[in-house]
Amino acid sequence: MFSFYLFPLVIILCVETITSKRISRNAVLFILLAVLLAVTLSLLPEGFFTWLWDKLNVFATVFLGIFVEAVPYLLLGTFASGLVEVFMDRDAMSRWVSNRPGAAAISGAFMGMVFPVCECGVVPLTRRLFKKGLPLSAGISFLLAAPVLNPIVIISTASAFGWGEMLLWRFVISLVIAVTVGLVFSAQGEAAEVLRPVMAGDDHDHIHAEAGDSVREKIRKALLITVDEFFDMGRYLVLGSMLAAGLQTFVSQSALLAIGSGPVLSVLVMLLLAVILSICSTVDSFVALGFTGVFSFGSVLSFLVFGPMVDIKSVMMYLQVFKRRAVFYIVGIPFLMSLAAGLVFNYFVK
Amino acid sequence: MSQRMFRSYQGLLLSGLFIFFVVKAVNGQLTWYINSRFVPLTIVGMIFLGILAQTIFTENRRSRLHETEHPDHHHEHDHAPSAVNLWVMLIPILIGVLIPARPLDSSAFATKGFNTSAPLISSDSSASIFETESQARNVLDWLKLFSFQDDVTPFIGEEASVIGFVYFDDQLASDQFYVSRFVVSCCAADGFAVAMPARWDDAATLRQDAWVLVTGNIESVTIKGQRVPMIVAETVQPVDAPDQPYLFP
C-alpha cells in the first residue's frame, strides 16, 4: 500500500526534475521504473513471494539434480576425448574404420563398446574423432548409438528390465536409427560440411599431441584438453539443465501423464517426456521402469530409444558442434523413427 | 586476456565446483539431488575435478617459470578465448550457494503430482515386502502392497509406523492428512511423490511439510476409485527430516 502514498510524491518529483533539468533523463526513467515496480508489487496477490520462493527451490533442486548427476559422465567423455587426441593418430583411425559409408556407419554405431560414454560425453568425443579423420557416417552413427550401445548402459538396462525383450529391442532399434542417420549423412560427404567451424578466438587447438612426447607429457596434455572441453560443453549442460528444470517447475508432468493414454498419444507423451526430463542414458532405464505400469511396452521403448539421442541438453551441445541444418536431421530423423517404432509395437506387437 | 589469466579462471572455477561437491558430500546432501546409488560415481567425479584444478595451477606455475627463464621468448598464442564462456559454470555454484538447499517437498506437487497408489513402480520387488515386519514398511511399501495384492484383508489392522512429511489435500476430511515421501530413481528431475492418508483427531494442529512419525493401524479406504491404505493414527510425533529425504526404489 505504501506506493499509494508514494505515488503523488514521485510525480511531483518527476515534474520538478524534468522542468528544472538538473537531473538527467536517465534518473527520471529510473524513478519511473521504480514506481512502476512498486505499483506492480503492491498489486500482486498475497503469498506471491512464498509461491515464487517455493518454485525457485524446486527449480534449484531439480537443476542441481540433473547437473550433479551429469558432471561425472561429462568428465568421462571429455577425458576420453583428451586421451584420443594424445594417444591415437590419424593412421590408426583409417586402419580401424572403413571408408565405405555402410560399413563405417555400422562400425561407428558399435564404437560405443570401446568408448563407454553417455549423451553428454559423446558430443565432445565425436568432435575429436572427426578431427582425427573419422568418416562422417561413422561419426554420426557413433553420436546417436554410443549412449545406448555401450557396456554401462547394457548393464543398467538389464538390471532394470532383465535380460529380455526391452533390452533387445532398445538396442536393435537404436542401432537401426543410428545407422540410418549415419547413411543419410554420408551423402553429405565431408565432416567439415556439417561441423561448425571453430570460431576464431575460441580455438582450443593449441594443445597438440606431438610425436616424441613422453607418457607423462601426453597425460598432461590430455588433462588440459579435458578441462577445455569440460568448460566448452559444460556451459551447454548448465543451460540445458536450467531449461529442463524450468520446464519441470512450471509444466505439470501429472497432466502430461494423464493425457498419455491411447496408442498414439502415449508414444508422443513419452517422447516429449524423454526430452524434458533430460536424464542421462546410463540411468534412464530405472526411470522408464517406473512408467511400465501405466504405459505400453511400445511407448516406454520409444522413451528408451529417443531419450539418449535427443534431449534438451544434448541438443544444446549439438548446436555448438554442428551446423543448424545438420542438427535438424540429427533430431528429426530419430524422432520420426522412434515414433514409428513405438506405434508399430503399440498396434501390431503388444 | 592472457592465456595464463584464462587458465587461472578455469582453475578457480574447477576449484569452486570441487569445493561445492565436497561440501555437499560432507553435509550428506548429495542424496537430496541424486539416488544414493550414484554417490560413489559422483565422488570419483569430484576427485577428478580436484585433479583437473591441480593440473591447471601446476600448468600456470610452469608457464610462469618458463617465462622468467626465457623472458625474450614471447608466447606465440597469447590470445586466449574470451572468459565469458567460462562464467556459465559459475551458475551451478551460485545456485548452490545462494538458494538454501531444500529437498523436494509439497511445493513440487503442483507440477510433479503425487500418487496414492504405486502405478509408477514395477511390481517385481513387491514379494519381499511380505516378509518385512509391518512396522518396517515405508509409505511406498504400503502403497505397493495395496496396488499389487488382490486381497488386502490380511494387512488390515496391522500396525504401521511410517515417516513422511505432512500434506493437506482439499479432498480429505479435516481430521485427515497425507504422509508423503518423494521417490527418486536417478536424480531429483525424475522424483515423484507418494502419499498415504492418515486419520488423526488433532490433524489440524499439524503444519504443511512438517516431518512426522505416524503410528497406528491400517485400514482400507477408497480414494478416487482406488483402494488405498489409511493409517488410523494413535500417535503423530514431530521428527527431524531424515538424512535421506527420498525413497530410492
Image (tube, coloured by chain):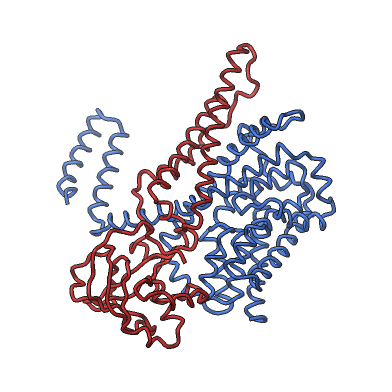
Chain colours: A blue, B red
Residue that appears at 67% across and 76% down: A344
Q: Residue at x 50, y 58 (%)?
A: B37
Q: Is residue B44 left or right of residue A3?
A: right
Q: Position of residue B172 (x, y in %)?
A: 27, 77
Q: Quadrant of residue A20?
A: top left
Please indicate whether residue B204 sits to the left or right of residue B150 in the image: left
> Where B147 falls versus A169 (above or below)?
below
Q: Nearer the viewer, residue A128 or A252?
A: A128
Q: Quadrant of residue B174?
A: bottom left
- Coordinates of residue A105 in the picture (x, y in percent): 77, 56
Quadrant holding the C terminus of chain A: bottom right
Residue A212 x %, y %: 76, 28
Residue displayed at 68% across by 62% down: A333
Q: Residue at x 38, y 48 (%)?
A: B27
* Position of A186 relative to B57 (above/below): below
Report if residue A348 is visible in the image: yes
